[in-house]
Image (cartoon, rainbow, N blue to C red):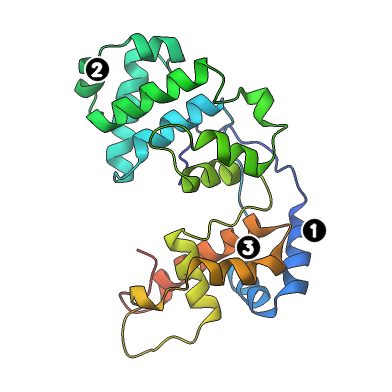
């Protein structure tokens, strides 16, 4: 998940949620039932810094518990007095970042991000707004440590792109299983109960052009399961 750098700053979605919900209801009866259970679509866009700042944060959060990652992110920002510029990050000794808790692999990823921002591989904020989702994924995954999932989260939570379906996401796949599959009640949900990404993709075709909204509801299906089902039936 992309984490908010500037708490309290929110932006309006660039699409009409009511139109999206109406489309999803009409295109998929089972998804409509999930929408009824969850209720209103409450996604609000996080503050929208540059792609460099967004990806810097994403790298710091990778493979860490949220609280630990937030602590490291805070230390980095405190050292620089905010998010560093790409050149400042490149010029910073690795030891400084290690002292803040950043691992060696992440330091290399951060400096590659900075270098690719300076050489134009990573677009500016104004440039990325005019790029297609596919082009954004293609250019940002050239950065060390940045995969398609990380870019998909940026597209949904930073940019508000309406038609992103992260088919490899654990929560999306579990939410799909909970919503669309017959699951045994005698045992916890197991990894082999999860649909293959291509299964999610094929059903998701009917949700276009609002697959980001469908994804949000699949994540909420996991929240419902965590609150109402026996242990093991949630997304965590």
- Viewer-proximal residue, 204 or 47? 204
* Spot occupied by residue 82 in the image (x, y as percentages of width and height): 43, 17
* Disc 3: which residue: 214
Please name the residue shown 77% across and 65% down the image. Answer: 23
Residues packed near mark 1 inside 10 Å, few (<14), some (14 to 19) or many (20 plus): few
Q: Does the CB distance between marks 3 and 2 fall below 8 Å?
A: no
Please name the residue shown 31% across and 37% down the image. Answer: 69
As measured in the structure, the alpha-carbon distance from the residue carrying label 3 to the one carrying label 1 is 13 Å
Relative to residue 232, is residue 8 depicted above or below? above
* Disc 1: which residue: 19
Please name the residue shown 38% across and 37% down the image. Answer: 145
* Spot occupied by residue 13 in the image (x, y as percentages of width and height): 70, 43
* Spot occupied by residue 63 in the image (x, y as percentages of width and height): 31, 45
Residue 46 visible from this viewpoint = no
Q: Helix or strand or loop: what does disc 2 sit on?
A: helix
As measured in the structure, the alpha-carbon distance from the residue carrying label 3 to the one carrying label 2 is 41 Å
As measured in the structure, the alpha-carbon distance from the residue carrying label 2 to the one carrying label 1 is 49 Å
- Viewer-proximal residue, 121 or 149? 121
Quadrant of the drawing holding the C terminus: bottom left
The label on residue 94 is 2
Please name the residue shown 38% across and 70% down the image. Answer: 234
Q: Earlier in the sequence, mark 3 or mark 1?
A: 1
């Amino acid at each position: 998940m992309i984490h908010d750098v500037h708490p309290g700053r929110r932006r309006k979605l660039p699409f009409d949620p009511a139109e999206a919900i109406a489309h999803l209801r009409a295109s998929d009866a089972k998804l409509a039932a999930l929408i009824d259970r969850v209720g209103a679509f409450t996604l609000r866009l996080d503050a929208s810094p540059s792609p460099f700042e967004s990806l810097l944060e994403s790298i710091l959060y990778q493979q860490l518990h949220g609280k630990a990652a937030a602590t490291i992110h805070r230390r980095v920002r405190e050292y620089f007095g905010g998010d560093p510029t790409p050149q400042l990050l490149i010029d910073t000794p690795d030891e400084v970042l290690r002292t803040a808790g950043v691992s060696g692999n992440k330091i290399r990823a951060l400096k590659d991000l900075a270098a690719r921002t300076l050489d134009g591989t990573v677009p500016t904020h104004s440039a990325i707004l005019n790029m297609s989702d596919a082009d954004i994924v293609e250019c940002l995954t050239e950065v060390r440590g940045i995969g398609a999932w990380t870019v998909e989260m940026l597209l949904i939570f930073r940019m508000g792109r309406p038609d992103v379906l992260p088919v490899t996401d654990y929560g999306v796949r579990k939410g799909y299983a909970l919503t669309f599959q017959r699951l045994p009640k005698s045992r916890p949900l197991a990894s082999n109960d999860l649909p293959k990404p291509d299964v999610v993709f094929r059903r998701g075709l009917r949700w276009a052009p609002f697959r980001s909204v469908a994804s949000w509801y699949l994540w909420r299906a996991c929240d419902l399961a965590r609150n109402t089902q026996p242990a093991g039936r949630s997304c965590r």
